[in-house]
Image: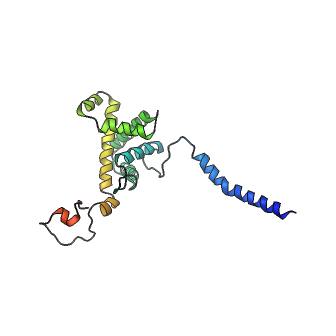
Amino acid sequence: MDRRKALKGLGLSLGYVVATPSVISILQSCKNDPQISWTPQFFSSNESFVLEKLIGLILPKTNDLPSALDVNIPQFIDAYVNEVSSKAEQEKLKKGIATISESLSKSPNIEAFKSLLTKYLKADQKDKEAFSENEDETLVLETLTNLRTMTIWAYKTSEKAGEEILAYDPIPGDFLGCISLEETTKGKAWSL
């Protein structure tokens, strides 16, 4: 038996064994289904994908602040809607996300999400009155407005925002009533 051939064959077979999971994961990543990295409690995976993209655009990452996705706002909203919202609120939000998803089904790229948010959330009064004539557009406007409000509320009440972005004192001490906010917290609002 030739040792060189045996070692070469052993090396190739080991290479195939190591490369197979990588090849399989590449092939699996070529699916057209939207992917999320968390398991939703209330929304479907497609609805959660839409929710995640919209929330990521509502509060994107900046130089000094983390994005809403960095502090897990989509997961929080999914859990909040599942555990706290009434059945009527749940149905309305689910129907609104489904309507948004249908309108984006032709081109679910980031530009389509941006134009949707711009169309509805930056609309003037005249446009909002025009939306009221169509039931689906009214539902999308209400859903996006509600989602923006929930995103901002959840972001401001998150632990990361409370401890790292806002002024935070885990053990409050003296009351200093006659000094400026700039002097005490360098201009930051207090975390509650």
On the image, the x and y values in percent for residue 116 come to 37, 36
- Image-based side of 91 in relation to 25, left or right: left
On the image, the x and y values in percent for residue 89 come to 33, 43
Decide which of 105, 98 is in the foreground and name it: 105
Decide which of 86, 135 is in the foreground and name it: 135
Residue 89 seen by the camera: yes
On the image, the x and y values in percent for residue 30 come to 57, 43
- Image-based side of 148 in relation to 38, left or right: left
Identify the residue at horizontal 67%, vertical 57% (top origin): 18
On the image, the x and y values in percent for residue 74 come to 39, 50
Decide which of 131, 84 is in the foreground and name it: 131
Q: Residue farthest to the right?
A: 1
Q: Kindly indicate the quadrant of the structure image that contains residue 47.
A: top left
Identify the residue at horizontal 25%, vertical 34% (top origin): 124
Identify the residue at horizontal 33%, vertical 40% (top origin): 144
Asked if residue 118 is positioned above or below residue 171 in the image, the reply reads above
- Image-based side of 169 in relation to 40, left or right: left
- Quadrant of the image containing the C terminus: bottom left
Residue 96 seen by the camera: no
Decide which of 178, 142 is in the foreground and name it: 178
Render colour scheme: rainbow
Q: Kindly indicate the quadrant of the structure image that contains residue 118.
A: top left
